[in-house]
Every structure is written in C-alpha cells, then in structure tokens.
Amino acid sequence: MADPKKTTATPGGVSAEAIAAAQKLFPKLGGTAANKSDVISGVSRGQDASGKPITTVIYPAGFQESYIKNLPPKDRVALQKQLKALNLYPKNFNPLGDGTVTAEDFNALLKLVAVGEQKGLGNIQDVINLAKKDKKVQTFLQTSGYSEAAREINYTNSSESKATLTDKFLSLFNEKPTAEELTSFQTILKNKEKAAKGSITNLELNDIILSLANKRIDTASKGALKGDAAALDVLDSGTLGRRVREIKAAYYNNGIPVSDTTIYKQAGLSLRDQDAYQNVLEEINNNAMMQWGKLGLDLKPGQTVRSKLQPFITTRAKIRGISEDDINVSDMTDVLKPDGSVKTYKEFKLEEYGSKEYLASDNYKMTVLDDTKAVFRNFGIM
C-alpha cells in the first residue's frame, strides 16, 4: 500500500516520487520538455537545505492535453468556466459548455502551467486560486505580460440596441419596450461594453435583457394581483404567457398549492435559458415528492403525479358520474394509506362506492331507481 504522505490527493498534483520516476524513464523531461510543451521549466525556485537550486520539473510535457482529456465531462465543463472567467481564451471564444475539448483549452492551460511551474504549484486549481487572488498574476495570464494597447471602443449604437431589445420583448411579451426601457438598456449596455473594453458575450447581453424583462414582470405581477386587466394581459402574452401557463399546469397536475406570485416569479427566472426552465420544473417535482411521498418519487421528464393517478381519477369520475377534468389532483390524497403507500385499485373502488360524494350523486340516485324498478318488475308491479 502506498504511503499517503508520498501521494497527492488533488487532481493535477504531481508527487516528488512520480517526478523522479518520470525523469529516470524519460530523461528528456528535465531538458527539452520545455521546448515540446512551450513552458519554460528548470528555473530555480530557490535553494534547498543544502544550498542547491530547486529546479525540479513539476509538469511533464503534454500535461495540458492529458490533464483536461482525463477529466470527467462535468469537471471539464467546470474547468472551462474557470478558464473563461479568467479571460484565458481568445477574444469572443466560448466553450460549447458540454465538455468538448479544443486547442484553445490546451493553450489556456499552458498559461497556468507556466505560472505553476515557476511558482512551485503542482496543482492547476492552486494556480487558478492564486490568479483569482493576485491581480498581477491574473493580468500576466491574460496579457502574457504585455501591456494592452489602448484601443477605441465601438459601442453598440442606439438603433442596434433598439432593434435587439424590441425583438426580444416582442417575443417575450408580444409588446415593444417602452422609451424608458430602451434608454435603460442602452445605458447598461454601454457601461458593460466600456468595462469589457469592447463587445460583451451573448450571455451577458441576455442577462441585461432579462433584468429589464423581470422588472416589467414584477410590475405586472403586482398589478395582476390587484385585478388590473392590462397587467394580466402582459402575463398571459408571448413566451412569458406560455411559460406562466406551463408552470401553473405543472403545479396543478402535481397537486401542489401555489400562489400566483410564485408562478410569475418562477416564469421570469425560467426565461434565461432551457436549463433555468428545467430547474423550475425540477423544483416542482421535488415539491411533489415531499407532498406525495412514494407516489411522487422518480417522476420522469414530462410525467406528473396526475399521470400516475390516472387510473384512480378515471374510476372516481365513472363512479360519481362526473368529468375527469373536474377532478383536482390535490383532492386525490385519499389514494394514500397512512404509511404513505398507495391503496390497491380494489380498495380505492370499494371506498368510492361508500363515499358521501357518491351517495349524494345523480349516479347513485339513478342506480337506486333502477334497482327499485327491477324489484317492482320481479313482483309484477310494473
């Protein structure tokens, strides 16, 4: 069993023993590896106890490729987000977001390796953490040590910004933005572009639009709760209206009571992207599990508590002589036993025939009448 003191516990770390073994097997790592990996290695990081310079190679040639390739997809995505946050990618380059590896990833990692090699940091995450704290290191990584040349910033002009926001608002609300919203959008956009010293990412642009959209949604929500017809129309139109109806249906079909305020707020949050919408639906499913116990477990995409209860709903509708659409999922809690398990179909059916709702229904009255007529016929009365 390996001595835990001689191994590294974090990905990207390289133990001294591993380095020594690698140098014996691949002696070129100590000399020409720098040329192959474009990283200057072998530079003294100080002296050891005996006064000898510490020049051990930390990262072997090709590390930048093997490291990211060997990460699980989820970890690759997380690493790429950190590289993007540190601006280590070329301008306007965006990772796909699914862990796809590119040459840009290797080049970004090489910058971290160069710093880690000479700072004595054998873990890529440690280099990233250093860059987050040390502005000088961060700037060095972004510019390779060169001063950024002053350049003119080309701001998005008013006609372009107007077209962008108008197109998005027509989709979201089926209405154009107000003059005030257009002015606010142009101001925020210009400030963002000024800070970025140029164009911003599509994600940043989308966030600005959604911040303005959610202000409109918030105002409309307050008006709708007071019965304002115009506000209700805003919340019932365009993509927003469709999303409100979908979220409301998800709560209803899972038998979960919810306020209109919550639905409007979640609808606004869900507009950011498909992942945000899925997060809202996942939250509803989690609520269903808490409310329905075993019946709410393992809900698949598109599945609801109502779909699981469908046989019981159909039975109740037939026995009571009512439409299935008139049965609310929230009224079906009597399918559950005290321990949270689901009653058998036979148990439920027998209980339905004994329920006060059935005994007061037209179905029951007709059944009694038919039975009475049958008795009279048997005695020759009819």
Image (spheres, rainbow, N blue to C red):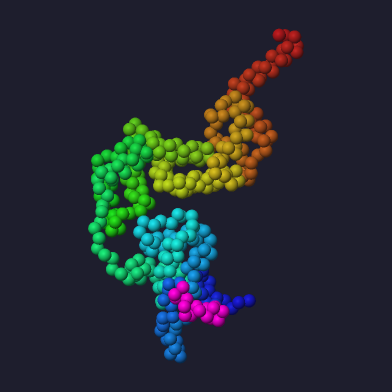
Q: Which residues are magenta?
A: 19-36
Which residue is pictured at 25% across the width and 48% down the height?
Answer: 157
Which quadrant of the structure image shows residue 118?
bottom left
Which residue is pictured at 54% across the width and 78% down the height?
Answer: 26
Which residue is pictured at 35% across the width and 66% down the height?
Answer: 142
Q: In this rendering, would 278 be left or right of 305? A: left
Which residue is pictured at 35% across the width and 42% down the height?
Answer: 168
Q: Position of residue 177 (x, y in %)?
A: 29, 40
Q: Is residue 79 above or below residue 370?
A: below
Q: Position of residue 273 (x, y in %)?
A: 43, 47
Q: Position of residue 150 (x, y in %)?
A: 24, 63
Q: Which residue is at the front of the view, 22 or 180?
A: 22
**How many badges with numbers are in the image?**
0
Please, what is the dominant secondary structure of the magenta stretch?
Answer: helix
**Observer able to see residue 79:** yes
Q: Is residue 301 above or below residue 107?
A: above
Q: Position of residue 276 (x, y in %)?
A: 44, 48
Q: Which residue is at the front of the view, 161 or 131?
A: 161
